[in-house]
Amino acid sequence: MAAGTESMTEEKAEEISSQEAPMEQIFTVEGVTAHGESDESGSPYISPKELSIKSNLKRSQMIDCQMLGKYLLLYCHHRTKHKVQPKKITDDRLSDVRYLHLPLFCAERAWYYGMQLKAEANTEPRKKYHMLSRIKKAVHYAEEFASLCENPKCDARTKLECKAYLALRRGGLQFEEENWKSAMDYYNQAKTIYEKLASAFTEDIQLLYLQQVEEVQPNIRYCAYNIGDQSAINELKEMRRKAGEGQLTTQLDDLLSQTREKQAATLSEVTWRGRTVPVRSEPVRLFLLNVQESAKDIESAESVDSKISIYESLLKQCIDAQQILRDSLQEDQNFKLAIRGQPIEGKISNQHYLHSYLTYIRLSKTIDRNLLLIQNLKGYLPGRQVEEGRKITKPQDLVRLYDIIIQNLSDIPNLHGLEDDTALTEEIQCRISGFKAFRTYYIAFSHVGAKKWKEAIALFERVLQNANAALKGYKALPKGQASLYNDEVRSLEELITTVDGEKYSCHASSILDVNDITDKVETMAINSKKPLVDRLDQYIEDKSLTSKRPNLVKFPPDFEPIPSRPLFFDLALNHVELPSLDDKLEQKQKQAQAGGLTGMVKGWFWGGQK
């Protein structure tokens, strides 16, 4: 990037200089007009309200509508074709707070450009050098900003914030250069300043400083781990479990991934369903290591949101690892046939089998996540006490989740390399029958809410069939394999007990529902103007029928329209046999022939005389 875009140019300075105004007219970043003050020497005094570094940056980031967690380039400027000589901002020109904004925003721009390059450096390693260059540039601007803030016109809060900001940027540079001791010292310095500032202001301003402390803490623990503190990695995991969703979660995931890269070097092979395959790809090793450690993290997580967040993070890593394997299998003929849905000849390769294993992990973790969601939603079903502001769960929501679980289970036996694994197929069929029982139960539950008693009773019978079939299948499994599903067996036994009671309750409700029909009949409005002959199919207690003038029929009856002249059609003519006239036709032909000869003779004799 040209030099004109890397520092405060003369054009920028002249633009601000042309717009200089008294301090009373400056519109600050917090949306208020800051009135300038003066110190004893009469110089303008920049108050805290005119330059709150944290709130200023937050507001600018919100205006740009770009997320920090993705390290997008926040403050972009177009490349200029002509080099210009930057005009240095001195203390004499520091009459407008916007002069301090220039180095601050330039530092932010360079920093987040570096973070964007860091994200891209995972696939393009050469960008790492460019990233370090941008971070060093950000430190340079931060130092320039710090030197300007040492001016007596800046108050104590501004100077403290500036020192903390400079410590953050210097710590970030040392962190990327893997100088862990120096990085931890800078981060601790920034943390101390922000904690002191948080204790000195109101709650709304205090929140900004405490948020910055939370963002710095994982970096401090990661530096401590690299220095030699083995307990730091456990603290990072604990932070991740409590984080839930947000920018801090992404930062913690990155730090934990960097830590596990060192441990993944020892994971060279994996064994699944009796077959051992080598693991050559580093991202795949890292993912498999995360899978091993995720079980402990989920068990120790306190809230449901934290557990779901861990599952979501694991599924994203699984998709990335699968893509890496898919790219490496582009030349595998069996893999190409499998993608097209064509039959495979012979035994699949080790990498292809590893891809099936990752698919199995993705399906299994998706099932575990959906079961966790179901467990959470069950507490908000109709008929249970729901806290205020919480949405009531519909039975259809649970049915939809069970459908997804059944589909995921059905996909597992179809994975390549497991075609002859009958033990796995039997195990999956048991689980499918069990989840079908739960799915059918909640369908019946929705019919109970609609008072469709017959349909509900029939569905409850189907629940018992599926549940008993699942329990029978679990008992047939080997003991070591069946012990993995003790929770599902226990849930099915409780479901059978519940359904037995619900079935008889529906039967009783269907009988008692007759009383509701009687009540409706009693409250039915009586149309006394309608005669009895027109409502013989309705039973209504009409007291007028026992009176002296019962309304039985309408008399005189209403006139009915009839056709004035009926139309008759001769339909029998086609079936009448008429007499034969052949004999009469022959007589006429004979007379015609005799008359013809006589006329001819007369024409000869009498005609000639005329």
Image: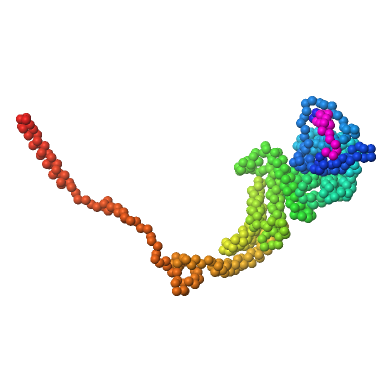
**Residue 83 is one of the magenta-drawn residues:** no
Please determine whether, in this image, residue 280 is positioned above or below residue 480: above
Protein image colouring: rainbow
Residue 158 image offset from top left, x and y in percent: 88, 42
Place of residue 40 in the rendered image (x, y in percent of width and height, measured from the top left): 94, 40
* Quarter residue 586 falls in: top left
In the image, 382: left or right of 10? left
Which corner quadrant of the image does residue 139 belong to? top right
Q: Is residue 270 above or below residue 129?
A: below
The image quarter containing residue 177 is top right
* Residue at point 68%, 49% (across, down): 363
Q: Position of residue 121 (x, y in %)?
A: 78, 37
Is residue 73 depicted above or below 389 in this figure? above
Direction from residue 263 to residue 437 in the image, left or right: left
Q: Which residues are magenta?
A: 3-25
Q: Residue at x 7, y 34 (%)?
A: 602
Q: How many marks?
A: 0
Q: In the image shown, does 313 or 67 lie closer to the viewer?
A: 67
Nearest to the observer: residue 603 or residue 592: 603
Res. 233 in view: no
- Residue 80 drawn at (x, y percent): 78, 28
The answer to whether one can see residue 34 in this image is yes
The chief SS type of the magenta part is helix
Viewer-closest of 306 and 99: 99
**Residue most extreme to the top:** 82
Q: Quadrant of the C terminus?
A: top left
* Residue lying at 69% horizontally and 39% vertically, measured from the top left: 329
Asked whether residue 24 is drawn in magenta, I would say yes
Locate the N terminus by quadrant.
top right
Q: Nearer the viewer, residue 2 or 307?
A: 2
At x 81% / y 26%, what residue is drawn?
A: 83
